[in-house]
């Protein structure tokens, strides 16, 4: 797997809108936040286009993603918003080009489609975390983690809040997944994810408990859960009570001897901690932790460490 360059003050982040249009005031808040971290931002004018419920045509949105990956002066790509639309541009992405120019790519929700495809087809880590408009509602811990992630070349641990052990145990493997609804929509397509040997992370918003049941059941009937190593449940906002979601998970995964942990603070809530996808981690349901041991960033050069106000985190 590609090791990525950590971000340092002065590095350039490209902003993309691969899915839906976004709220301008929330967008401006997120842009100010990143600028306050001493990052330069490349904000292409195309991201403000609108085509019905999409942030421009499919061709335009895909072309921008390809261009940002090809531009070696851009060190990372951060998505403005999810919504809907990432699925439509998967066939238009230049995976060979992206594989040759790996860089940090951040998104969540509908962007799960791209996180999955880029992770599997381009052999590079990607990052499930707050998007540009999300910073307006994200809590301080999520905002801090979004920056620390890219300045820490070492281990990274997420702890459930609170810990809810559905099935005990420990397991290791690359982390896969994201938004449950989007993952299910990939089934039967050329971009269908392979969860074999992996820790499956899922979260969602605004889905009734029976729909969560239906989607997990579809994954199971499709054989997508047969060889997973463990399950990480993030936030399920407006999806019924936590007890209902955990009861569903207990039933779905009861015939699998794998750890299943609920309460990881990642998803659509105000606390949405950065969660690398495609990187090996260890899930310890008993302690309520997901720990990444693999070094998904190269070491920060000494000169950059001295220049960085967060060098002590590395």
Image (cartoon, helix red, strand yellow):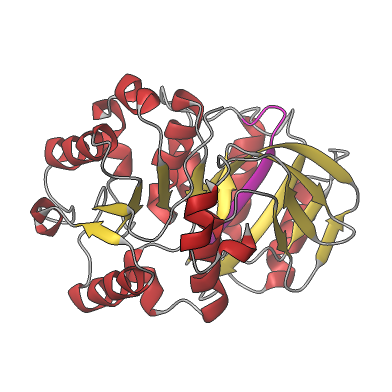
- Above-or-below relation of 225 to 42: above
Front in this rendered view, residue 174 or 196: 174
* Majority secondary structure of magenta residues: strand
Residue 267 seen from this side: no
Image quarter where the C terminus lies is bottom right
Residue 279 position by quadrant: top right
Q: Where is residue 150 in the image (x, y as percent from the top left)?
A: 50, 54
Q: Where is residue 183 in the image (x, y as percent from the top left)?
A: 50, 42
Is residue 287 left or right of 221 when viewed as pictured? right
Residue 59 seen from this side: yes
Which residue is found at the position 27% from the left and 47% from the top? 85
Image quarter where the N terminus lies is top right
Is residue 120 left or right of 92 when viewed as pictured? right
Q: Does the magenta stretch include residue 236?
A: no
Which residue is found at the position 73% from the left and 34% from the top? 228
Looking at the rendered structure, the number of numbered marks drawn on it comes to: 0
Front in this rendered view, residue 178 or 70: 70
Q: Is residue 203 magenta?
A: yes
Residue 108 position by quadrant: bottom left
Front in this rendered view, residue 276 or 101: 101
- Above-or-below relation of 223 to 239: above
Residue numbers of the magenta segment: 195-204
Residue 23 position by quadrant: bottom left
Q: Position of residue 240 (x, y in %)?
A: 60, 72
């Amino acid at each position: 797997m590609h090791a990525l360059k950590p971000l340092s003050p002065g590095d350039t982040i490209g902003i993309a809108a691969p899915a839906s249009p976004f709220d301008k005031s929330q967008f401006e808040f997120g842009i100010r936040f990143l600028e306050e971290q001493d990052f330069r931002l490349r904000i292409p004018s195309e991201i403000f286009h609108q085509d019905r419920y999409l942030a421009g045509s499919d061709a335009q949105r895909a072309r921008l993603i390809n261009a940002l990956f090809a531009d070696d002066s851009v060190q990372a790509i951060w998505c403005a918003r999810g919504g809907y639309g990432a699925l439509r541009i998967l066939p238009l992405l230049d995976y060979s080009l992206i594989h040759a120019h790996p860089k940090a790519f951040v998104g969540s929700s509908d962007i799960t489609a791209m996180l999955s495809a880029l992770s599997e087809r381009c052999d590079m880590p990607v990052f499930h975390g707050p998007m540009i408009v999300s910073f307006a509602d994200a809590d301080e811990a999520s905002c801090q983690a979004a920056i620390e992630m890219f300045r820490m070349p070492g281990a990274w641990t997420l702890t459930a809040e609170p810990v809810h052990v559905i099935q005990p145990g420990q397991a290791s493997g690359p982390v896969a997944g994201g938004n449950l609804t989007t993952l299910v929509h990939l089934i039967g397509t050329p971009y269908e994810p392979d969860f074999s040997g992996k820790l499956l992370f899922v979260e969602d918003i605004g889905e009734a408990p029976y729909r969560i049941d239906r989607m997990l059941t579809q994954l199971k009937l499709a054989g997508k859960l047969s060889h997973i190593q463990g399950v990480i449940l993030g936030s399920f906002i407006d999806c019924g009570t936590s007890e209902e979601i955990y009861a569903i998970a207990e039933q779905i995964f009861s015939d699998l001897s794998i750890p299943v942990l609920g309460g990881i603070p990642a998803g659509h809530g105000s606390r949405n901690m950065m969660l690398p996808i495609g990187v090996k981690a260890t899930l310890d349901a008993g302690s309520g932790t997901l720990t990444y041991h693999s070094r998904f960033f190269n070491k920060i050069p000494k000169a950059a460490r001295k220049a960085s106000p967060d060098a002590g985190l590395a």
